[in-house]
Amino acid sequence: MIRFQPKSVYIFILFLCFISCKEETKNEERVEEKEVVILPPEDLYGGLFYDIQQNENLFSDSKTFVDAVPEKNIDSIKTEYQKIKTKGDSTILAFLKDNFEIPGEETSKEYQTDSSDIGTHIKKLWSVLKRPADEELSGTLIPLPNPYIIPGGRFREIYYWDSYFTMLGLQVDGEVETIQNMVDNFSFLINEFGFIPNGNRTYYLSRSQPPFYALMLDVLAEEKGDSIYAEYLPELEKEYQFWMKGAKNLSENDSVINRVVRMSDGSILNRYYDDNNTPRPESYREDIKTAEEAVAANEDLTEEEVYRNLRAAAESGWDFSSRWIKPDANGNFNLSAIHTTDILPVDLNSLLYHLEKTIAKAYLISENPDKAREYKERAEDRASAIEKYFWNASKGFYMDYDFTAGEHTSVVSVAGVYPLFFKISSEEKAKKVAEIIESQLLMKGGVVSTPNHSGQQWDAPNGWAPLQWMAYKGLQNYEISALANTIKERWTILNEKVYKNTYKMTEKYNVEDLSKESGGGEYPTQDGFGWSNGVYKKLTSE
């Protein structure tokens, strides 16, 4: 039985019955009941966590240790560590391997099947990427009650927004039961924590990711009917309440609380945020370095502000991108100038518009017209605010809005297509958006996330599967089919080219120079890969 302590969203205790030992006693197996405590890694391991994560000689990836599974009593491990902590890196590494199940360096071999055609390869990959319902003991992993698909590579757990795009491919391949299981896992997380975390790890319990839950229900409803919306209405409401937490307390004098921002005209829009302002456990060394550089460059900043902005960018899914960075005088984007929490993102607010519309639909199906009307009006109000604050008339494009500066950011990005995906835009504006996509974002292999070469992975020259789908579908909604099909064809041809040469489906692709691999970011390009598989399948079925 799983029982969570409700007082803290970030720190929780998991009680379970675990077979701690098996002894032959009178030819019978004796089973002991053991209480197992699962906490975020910094609370679980204390000084051991900080020592390991600050030592770059032990693991090249900061995510490795926080994903490790302790194989012995934690208190015993910490006690033993004190005896060897000064004996050098090789001794410490041997100690860790003796006391933890350390995640291996995932290789492309794990995800290779054979020289099948790409469609068959992806269909086989679903079983490789599928994880069963979790056993009730796994370090920082939050156990989920149903099987699920992971992205692949270093991403050994479920991820929120990835899963929607993965589901698109599962739907094409008839994996409806898996889609149902994943929706139910996300519903479980909403009901346990009041929101969907970034992923099912304890170190993700202070933030979410782009709210795609309502779109997952759209996929499920296509297979099982619209009654699905009423069935999951309580979870839709809880998801919405998480993003709108504090909205009722907003005023002219207190206009920013958590993820909600009150504009001067009374409109309420949303930003990405994180409840914590410390280095991310899974990117510990990287965050400390970025914060040190930021504070050195700007004495008015605090390290806590930098950590919060890094975490907020992680909640966006675009970690990291010039979208969240103030350019310097020369137009360069240095991560130390990150200011995510100052920005109202056009994609987030478009997603919340869809969530409001979906809740209205669910209430209508549930025969509650008053509540349906309430949420319909909220959606209409948000659509008006999106048009007012995100449409940049001089650029002819939807752009993020810096509410602290009272102006649009300077970055053109594929996020500007979200109002087309959700049919918020007018026909006239959609045509202008298409012109900017074609002139600034369309490359040889699909659309680039932004035109900026910042060195961050969500900038040029990289293209990402979810953004190809949003752009393709958004343009199709306005019958801008030639450009939509060009994006589709260039992206799928690039996927096929890379697959033919490597037998890999990768996390991201270089869409500018098709002879090169993608790059940038805090880790190497990952193989697997859930959302690339899903979008390829969906695009080639259209």
Image (cartoon, rainbow, N blue to C red):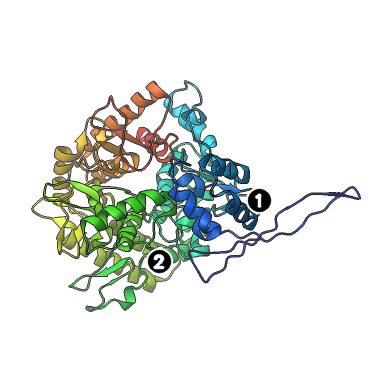
Q: Which residue is mark 1?
A: 72
Q: With 369 as the anchor, is 97 left or right in this view?
A: right
Depth check: give the residue in front, 51 or 199.
51
The tally of labels here is 2
Q: Which mark is residue 242?
A: 2
Depth check: give the residue in front, 194 or 203.
203
Q: Report x, y in % for residue 218.
A: 41, 52
Q: With 244 as the anchor, is 96 left or right in this view?
A: right
Depth check: give the residue in front, 358 or 295.
295
Could you tell me how far apart the alpha carbons at marks 1 and 2 are, in whole angstroms? 36 Å
Depth check: give the residue in front, 529 or 87.
87
Q: Which mark is residue 81?
A: none
Q: Report x, y in % for residue 402.
A: 19, 60
Picture layout, residue 365 above or below residue 410: below
Picture layout, residue 120 above or below residue 92: above
Q: With 400 as the anchor, is 317 left or right in this view?
A: right
Residue at (40% x, 59% y) in the render:
207
Residue at (57% x, 46% y) in the render:
147
Residue at (32% x, 55% y) in the render:
310
Q: Report x, y in % for residue 184.
A: 53, 54
* Amino acid type of the residue tagged 1 in the rendering: Lys
Residue at (15% x, 64% y) in the render:
406
Q: Secondary structure at mark 2?
A: helix
Q: Report x, y in % for residue 28.
A: 87, 50
Q: Name the residue at the left extreme.
A: 394
Q: Secondary structure at mark 1?
A: loop
* Amino acid type of the residue tagged 2 in the rendering: Phe
Q: Which quadrant of the figure contains the C terminus?
A: top left
Confirm whether residue 451 shows in the render: yes
Q: How dense is the environment of label 2, judged by Cα within 10 Å: few (below 14), some, or many (20 and up)?
A: some
